[in-house]
Amino acid sequence: MGANRVKEGMSGSRVVAVIASASALVTATRLCRPPDLFELRLDRLRHSLELVDRAIPKLRAPLILTARHPAEGGRGTLRADARQALLERFLEHAAFIDIELRSIKQMRGLIQAAQQRRVGLILSWHDLNGRITGPALRRKVICAASAGATIFKVATRTETPAELARVISLFQKTPRKLPIAAMGIGKLGRVSRIQLDQLSSALTYVALGEPAVAGQPSLSQLRRHRSAYGI
């Protein structure tokens, strides 16, 4: 399914279930009620690619492909060419690819190939040190928009109430050059994702099995919260 068909129905936050292990992949194929999208963390699945091949036809939701940069939480020490090869291998199945802003230059060819296939482009910034500021976020949004992003994704540390308030405030106040998916990581990550989901973050990421990062709620937890506030 292409990105255009996904975007036609995009109102509010779309739920993305992260597949970051072989066991999560098996779980995903068995869901009676799938999420809006699945994300394949190919850096974490790189030793199970034949299993990924077999599972893709059974995943009943559009796919986001990502192979995360090691400096932004990626598993292993994969170079840009190795990460690009993982994305290229499964590109024909993708509704979106997720590439870090820092990787745009090295992956320009892949981005062009994705655009030719009408695959959506999520450009992301994972602020693992929690140093995000309003001006920095606005610059990242402008950069992502200029590079042709469909969605800009930002993840930042939320270990304290002040950090949680900051990311929510930044999300509310940043001019919307394009849709923004925002989320917290760490102690208050789950709270941040639920609150940002209510504020219509473009995407809300949940875990299948063990969370890929601290703070990811499970698919069932998010659905319970959504039911409680009438979504």
Image: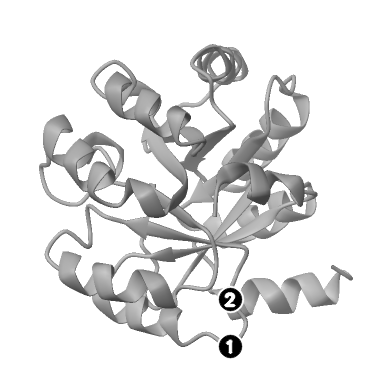
Residue 213 seen from this side: no
Quarter assignment of residue 202: top right
Image quadrant containing the N terminus: bottom right
- Say above or below: 2 vs 211: above
Image quadrant containing the C terminus: bottom right
Q: Amino acid at mark 1?
A: Cys
Q: Amino acid at mark 2?
A: Pro
The residue closer to the viewer here, 215 or 143, is: 143
Q: Is residue 211 left or right of residue 144?
A: left
Q: Is residue 184 left or right of residue 57?
A: right
Residue in the image at 37% along x and 69% along y? 56
Residue 50 placement (x, y as % from top left): 17, 70
Q: Secondary structure at mark 2?
A: loop
Quarter assignment of residue 69: top left
For label 1, the residue is 32
- Say above or below: 206 vs 26: above
- Say above or below: 138 vs 58: above
Residue 72 placement (x, y as % from top left): 30, 38
For label 2, the residue is 34
Q: Is residue 121 left or right of residue 23?
A: right
